[in-house]
Image (cartoon, coloured by chain):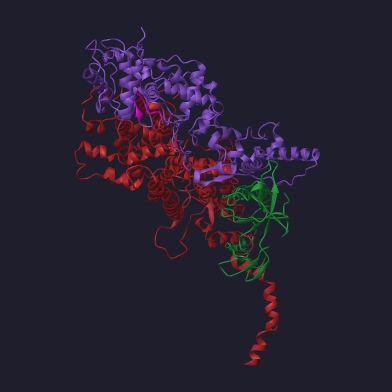
Chain colours: A red, B purple, C green
């Protein structure tokens, strides 16, 4: 036995001990990274594949997916902003106190005596607003490039869920500074949650089924906004919703991989590929295009990812190309956030005063369009129409199953024209409805005794929904294409959202009256 | 793409750096502390008395958790307790007067007297006297500063002449005929306690707040509003029924200071104990009550002449002829009645009855007047379709019985028996 | 030639690409790091909450020789004798409990450290003596103790 051991070790155990100690750094590094230096394509592919953070990417990415004016990097901006918000949010949590006595003071301390407090707070606020915008634009991009088709339907729905979570996060965070702006915006939000009461009251069902009050109490933990509401909103904003969003985000990114990778057009013109990173290796090796499919590496049942029209020459390594482009998108949105943070301070008005309403009391800007609709009917504007909108959006990939070309903006010239016409239609309808309500009021002005149910069913919001649906169906008939109908409907929704948001933020003043410009508001 | 990356990176770096500089290198308070050290060195050079001073440049604060306040004024106002800086300019100026002897800043802080945003460290935010600053208590200057003494003090002070004048005017103009103060007073107008706290940005029910007034009050809407209500009562709201007392500018200013002091209790502060009042004579008490509650409607010293809209008799009743109405024709009789009220409190409780002719008639009238004061009385309309005139309110809840009868005694004494 | 081998082994990133994007990425990372580090300054506030280290104790008339006063908010003992006024910490140097004063010594209730009246450790696990703090007179003639300024034991302010 002794001889065996002597033959095995050329060196004694003790010197082996010291040798191991000396080699600790390089052994450690080798154990962390399970690939060698990134000097070959194989190593780079392996790096993506074996790293838990990176392997949400595929090892190779199609060149066209990286084209900036295809996706505008909006998805990366959404995720990047979420990351920025998490980091700044965690830092803010060190000082913020979720108690009505201390919340406002803790905000003041953050701004004045916490190093970089003003910076982090502003980044958090503007980052949140930008994230809402980015999420909207991302949804529009996915829609207009038909990227919800061909197996990507469920991911579209997941995206809608993420959209709702984003709005919920923004709404819950809005209350936390506990100033006048926060308090009254949340009052409106909580009463929107209670607005089913308007419906059940009109139907005389409230005594059986008072879901409105139930929702409001669930949200506030009380009948009015106080400490209970604050701690609930804090919990939702800092723990529960971020967790949910992260979970769904994981699913969302995973589904991108499984449903066919990052979106890009089915048919690619080589001219469109100019300026993008080239797979120089493959060019030397492959003379002509060939069909290629990748089997899923693990034994997973399901689709095979097929790159129908692609040859390996159009695939580029994730490291470095996709990562660098993602980094650009991230730095870009970070730069915008920081510049905004430098020039504009996040608002903080007087401490919340339950007996003194802000006038006008406005919801956060992304809810202002809703608030305009709510000013006609609380239930319809607050719950009815948003539900219709979300359900409608969710149904799009299931109703529009036309094969058509994936990945082309607006489909074609015809589609572009349709989009512009739909935008015009939506603008005209909105402006017309608003003109009528501003100048003449609505049913209650003309028939004071009219039952509330009539107003719930027939109000500017529902009329717009009706008009847009008619327009959409009309489009389907004319173009004989569901996709075109979808484009019409989506465009109407998108444009009307923008117009109503603009209108309610600029042209609505104290007592929700119409004003041509904010400087004309009475000095109260 | 590369260019975009370069530009974004440079922008991120640049603005982060700007933030850092703004906060740590170009901060306002640092400049002041450095200036202080320079001036200190000079002073130390000139005098033989070397001071070992705190040399580190850092933020300072006065921490007052009982009052839920933190005052960071001392980050810039380093020398408030250093008498050598009396002739320098703010913020490195010694605090004037000897106020700090009795009000140690370590225990009181600064904002409890001066208002302002104590937690801020930028002068503009501390002052908070412009619309965008959203702080309810901007820094308050003299003479309005006097109002804040009365968060704790109760007795009028020699240091607060404007307040004293305002208080005197308030208590002799009969304001509590319509307004309430601490729950006592009339029914026609608002409770005045809390007026001083009314949010500077509060939306008052008017758009007639004269914009030219605002600059005179440092854009403090609360002060401008109070002044306007006192000097130009018909300005807001436009259908206000408040009388125009024709106060001069100085008097209106004094009243503004007094009304500003009517604020809600601040947390952590106790009012100084009330000194026991010197007992007043019956007539002095009566006069005081009359001036506080009655004189606005019934005229100074009851001379009447104040119009009552749509009232059958057009003007409010005069009260200085009450003695006649009570069948007291001789001065001795009036004096005897006053004496009786003084001794027994109420003419109904006299034992024995005063020896005056027709005492029963006198007693009946006295009781009638007393009951009108206690229960109120409705005024008859001249034009039945017109608006209701001002009724005599019930004072039972606001004026203690003793003071009701002393007021009647005072009114009796107003009669001029000489003519 | 074995195509597979070629793909595996040959370098594909050109030097031009590496330099161009490499330097841009490094600048980007550096910028990001600078921003992140600036934000990570947050956990340590510029101003610590709580009562100030420097506090007024009164006038010299409040401290005739023979006085011992304990300031419980600031946890400082102030002594006055013929030689002057001095201030000493009441916080045990072992693990921070407050010592109590007996006739001729200070005793810590937590682990029994004992100090003599000048703060020197006589017994127990305390590693250091009780700190003496500076007592100074302000220009306004008020006396002030500064817990940020530790002085030699025995330092007294002559008034």
Quarter of the image with the N terminus of chain C in it: bottom right
Q: Nearer the viewer, residue A381 or A119?
A: A119
Residue B158, given in percent of the width and then of the height, sits at 55, 28
Question: In the image, B207: left or right of A202?
Answer: right
Q: Quadrant of residue A500?
A: top left
Q: Position of residue A101 (x, y in %)?
A: 45, 45
Q: Position of residue B387 (x, y in %)?
A: 27, 15
Report the magenta residues as a range: B184-192
Instruction: Name the residue nearer the viewer: A272 or A143.
Output: A143
Residue shown at 52% from the left, 58% from the top? A55
Q: Is residue B217 left or right of residue A472?
A: right
Q: Nearer the viewer, residue A2 or B125?
A: B125
Where is residue A430 drawn, in percent x and y?
36, 27
Residue at 62% x, 40% y: name it: B74
Q: Is residue A301 visible?
A: yes
Q: Nearer the viewer, residue A87 or B404?
A: B404
Main SS category, magenta section: loop
Q: Is B87 on the left-hand or right-hand side of B117?
A: right
Confirm whether residue A519 shows in the render: no
Examine the structure image and report whether residue B190 is included in the region drawn in magenta. yes
Q: Is residue A79 left or right of residue B123?
A: left
Total number of numbered discs in the rendering? 0
Q: Is B292 inside the magenta-drawn segment?
A: no
């Amino acid at each position: 036995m002794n001889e065996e051991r002597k033959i095995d070790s050329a060196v004694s155990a003790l010197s082996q001990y010291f040798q191991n100690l000396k080699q600790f750094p390089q052994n450690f590094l080798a154990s962390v990274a399970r690939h060698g230096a990134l000097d070959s394509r194989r190593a780079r592919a392996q790096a993506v594949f074996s790293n838990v953070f990176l392997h949400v990417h595929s090892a190779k990415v199609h060149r066209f997916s990286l084209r900036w004016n295809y996706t505008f990097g909006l998805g990366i901006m959404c995720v990047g902003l979420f990351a920025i918000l998490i980091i700044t949010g965690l830092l803010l949590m060190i000082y913020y106190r979720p108690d009505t006595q201390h919340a406002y003071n803790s905000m003041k301390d953050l701004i004045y005596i916490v190093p970089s407090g003003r910076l982090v707070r502003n980044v958090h606020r503007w980052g949140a607003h930008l994230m809402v915008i980015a999420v909207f634009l991302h949804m529009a991009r996915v829609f207009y490039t038909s990227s919800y088709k061909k197996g990507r339907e469920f991911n579209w729905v997941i995206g809608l869920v993420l959209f709702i979570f984003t709005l919920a996060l923004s709404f819950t965070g809005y209350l936390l500074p506990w100033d006048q702006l926060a308090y009254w915006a949340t009052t409106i939000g909580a009463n929107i949650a209670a607005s089913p009461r308007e419906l059940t009251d009109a139907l005389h069902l409230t005594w059986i089924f008072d879901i409105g009050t139930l929702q409001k109490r669930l949200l506030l933990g009380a009948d009015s906004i106080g400490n209970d509401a604050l701690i609930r909103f804090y919990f939702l904003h800092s723990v529960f919703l971020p967790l949910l969003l992260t979970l769904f985000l994981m699913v969302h990114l995973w589904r991108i991989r499984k449903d066919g990778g990052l979106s890009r057009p089915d048919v690619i013109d080589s001219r469109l590929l100019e300026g993008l990173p080239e797979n120089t290796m493959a060019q030397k090796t492959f003379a002509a295009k060939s069909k290629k499919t990748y089997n899923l590496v693990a034994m997973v049942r399901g689709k095979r990812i097929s790159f129908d029209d692609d040859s390996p020459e159009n695939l580029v390594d994730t490291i470095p190309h996709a990562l660098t482009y993602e980094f650009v998108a991230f730095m870009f949105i970070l730069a915008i956030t920081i510049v905004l943070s430098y020039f504009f301070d996040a608002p903080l008005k007087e401490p919340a005063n339950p007996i003194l309403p802000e006038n006008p009391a406005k919801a956060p800007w992304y809810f202002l369009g809703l608030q305009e609709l709510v000013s006609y009917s609380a239930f319809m504007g607050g719950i009815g129409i948003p539900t219709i909108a979300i359900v409608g959006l969710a149904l799009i990939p299931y109703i529009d199953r036309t094969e058509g070309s994936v990945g082309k903006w607006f489909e074609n010239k015809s589609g572009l024209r349709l989009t512009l016409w739909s935008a015009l239609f939506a603008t005209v309808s909105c402006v017309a409805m608003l003109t009528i309500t501003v100048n003449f009021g609505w049913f209650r002005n003309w028939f004071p005794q009219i039952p509330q149910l009539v107003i719930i069913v027939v109000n500017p919001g529902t009329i717009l929904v009706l008009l847009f649906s008619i327009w959409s169906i009309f489009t389907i008939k004319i173009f004989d294409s569901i996709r075109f109908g979808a484009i019409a409907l989506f465009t109407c929704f998108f444009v009307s959202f923008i117009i109503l948001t603009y209108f309610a933020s600029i042209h609505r003043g104290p007592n929700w009256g119409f004003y041509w410009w904010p400087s004309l508001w009475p000095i109260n | 793409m590369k260019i975009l990356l370069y530009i974004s990176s440079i922008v991120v770096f640049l603005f982060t750096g700007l933030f850092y500089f703004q906060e740590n290198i170009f901060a306002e308070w640092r400049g002041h502390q450095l200036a202080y050290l320079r001036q200190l060195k000079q002073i130390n050079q000139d005098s033989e008395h070397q001071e070992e001073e705190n040399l580190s440049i850092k933020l300072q604060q006065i921490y007052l958790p009982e009052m839920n306040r933190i005052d960071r004024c001392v980050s810039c106002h380093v020398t408030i307790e250093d008498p050598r800086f009396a002739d320098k300019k703010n913020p490195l100026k010694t605090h004037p007067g000897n106020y700090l002897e009795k009000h140690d800043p370590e225990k009181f802080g600064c904002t409890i007297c001066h208002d302002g945003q104590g937690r801020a460290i930028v002068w503009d935010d501390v002052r908070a006297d412009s619309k965008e600053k959203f702080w309810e208590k901007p820094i308050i200057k003299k003479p309005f500063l006097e109002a804040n003494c009365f968060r704790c003090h109760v007795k009028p002070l020699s240091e607060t002449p404007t307040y004293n004048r305002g208080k005197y005017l308030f208590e002799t103009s009969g304001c509590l005929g319509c307004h309430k103060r601490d729950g006592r007073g009339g029914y026609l107008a608002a409770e005045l306690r809390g007026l001083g706290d009314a949010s500077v940005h509060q939306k008052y029910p008017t758009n007639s707040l004269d914009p030219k007034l605002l600059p005179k009050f440092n854009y403090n809407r609360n002060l401008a509003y109070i002044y306007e209500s006192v000097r130009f009562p018909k300005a807001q709201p436009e259908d206000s029924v408040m009388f125009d007392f024709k106060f001069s500018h100085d008097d209106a200013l004094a009243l503004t200071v007094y009304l500003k002091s009517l604020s809600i209790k601040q947390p952590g502060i106790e009012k100084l104990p009330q000194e026991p009042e010197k007992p007043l004579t019956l007539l002095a008490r009566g006069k005081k009550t009359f001036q506080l509650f009655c004189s606005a409607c019934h005229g100074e010293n009851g001379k009447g002449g104040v119009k009552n809209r749509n009232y059958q008799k057009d003007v409010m009743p005069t009260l200085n002829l009450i003695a006649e109405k009570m069948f007291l024709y001789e001065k001795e009789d009036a004096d005897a009645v006053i004496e009786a009220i003084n001794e027994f409190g109420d003419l109904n409780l006299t034992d024995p009855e005063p020896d005056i002719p027709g005492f029963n008639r006198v007693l009946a009238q006295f009781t009638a007047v007393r009951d009108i004061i206690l229960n109120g009385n409705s005024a008859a309309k001249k034009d039945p379709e017109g608006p209701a005139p001002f009724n005599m309110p019930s004072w039972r809840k606001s004026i203690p019985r003793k003071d009701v009868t002393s007021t009647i005694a005072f009114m009796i004494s107003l009669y001029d028996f000489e003519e | 030639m074995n195509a597979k081998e070629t793909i595996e082994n040959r370098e594909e990133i050109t030097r031009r690409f590496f330099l161009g994007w490499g330097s841009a990425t490094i600048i980007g990372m550096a910028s990001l790091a600078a921003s992140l580090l600036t934000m990570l300054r947050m956990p340590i506030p510029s101003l610590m909450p709580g009562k100030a280290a420097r506090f007024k104790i009164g006038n010299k008339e409040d401290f005739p020789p023979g006085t011992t006063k304990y300031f419980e908010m600031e946890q400082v003992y102030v002594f006055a004798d013929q030689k002057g006024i001095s201030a000493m910490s009441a916080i045990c140097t072992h693990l921070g409990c407050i010592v109590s004063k007996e006739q001729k010594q200070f005793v810590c209730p937590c682990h029994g450290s004992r100090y003599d009246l000048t703060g020197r450790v006589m017994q127990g696990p305390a590693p250091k003596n009780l700190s003496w703090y500076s007592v100074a007179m302000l220009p306004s003639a008020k006396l002030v103790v500064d817990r940020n300024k530790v002085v030699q034991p025995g330092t007294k302010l002559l008034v």
